[in-house]
Amino acid sequence: MSTSLAEFGVMPELTGFLNDLDHTRLLTPEEMAHYRASSMLQPPVTPEELATELVRHGKLSRYQAETLLTGRCKGLIMGNIELLAPLGKGGWLMFFLPMTSIPMSCLPLNSSP
C-alpha cells in the first residue's frame, strides 16, 4: 500500500508541523533541534518530506505522521503510552497498537467476568 501521506488532509506549514510534533513529545529535545534545523534547508523541506523521513527512520509510525500532517497533535500519547496505529473500533471504543517504555507486565488490565 503506497499511498502518499499528503492524501490524508491539508498539510500544515513546516513550522506548524514542527510545533505540533514538539507538542506531542514523541521526539527528544535533541531530535527536535535536529529536525528544526531541516526547516532552514534550501530548497525548503515540505512537511510531507519531513514526515516521510521520520517514518523511514523509525521516529514516527505512519499513523502518527498522517495525524500530524492533518494538523492534529492531540491523542498520540496517553500518559507513558504512544499510540502507534489504530487496530479497530467497537461501539464507542477505539483500539490502538500501543508502545510503552514500561514493561508490559506492569500495565493495568481491565477484564470483564
Image (cartoon, rainbow, N blue to C red):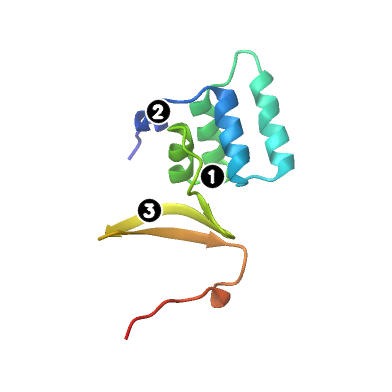
Which numbered disc, 1 or 3, marks the residue that appears first in the sequence?
1
Q: Which residue is mark 2?
A: 6
* Residue 86: assigned label: 3
Q: Earlier in the sequence, mark 3 or mark 2?
A: 2
Q: Mark 2 and 1 residues: CB-CB less than 8 Å, in contact?
A: no
Q: Nearer the viewer, residue 45 or 98?
A: 98
Q: Which residue is mark 1?
A: 60
| CA neighbours of label 3 inside 10 A, class few (<14), some (14 to 19), many (20+) | few
Query: Which quarter shows the N terminus?
Result: top left
In three-dimensional space, the C-alpha distance between marks 2 and 1, rounded to whole angstroms, equals 16 Å
**Mark 3, secondary structure of its residue:** strand
The quarter in which the C terminus is drawn is bottom left
Whether tag 3 and tag 2 are in contact, CB under 8 A, the answer is no
Residue kind at label 3, given as amino acid type: Pro
Q: Which mark is residue 112?
A: none
What SS does tag 2 mark?
Answer: helix
Where residue 40 appears, as percent x and y from the top left, is 68, 19
Residue type beneath disc 1: Leu
Tell me the kind of residue under disc 2. Ala
- In the rendered view, would you say 10 is above or below 87? above
Real-space Cα distance between discs 1 and 3? 14 Å
Q: Residues within 10 Å of mark 2 (few under 14, many from 20)?
A: some
Quarter of image, res 37: top right
Q: Position of residue 28 (x, y in %)?
A: 69, 45
CA gap, disc 3 and disc 2: 19 Å
Specify few, some or many for label 1: CA neighbours under 10 Å numbering under 14, 14-19, or 20 or more. Answer: many
Vertical placement of 66 versus 95: above or below? Answer: above
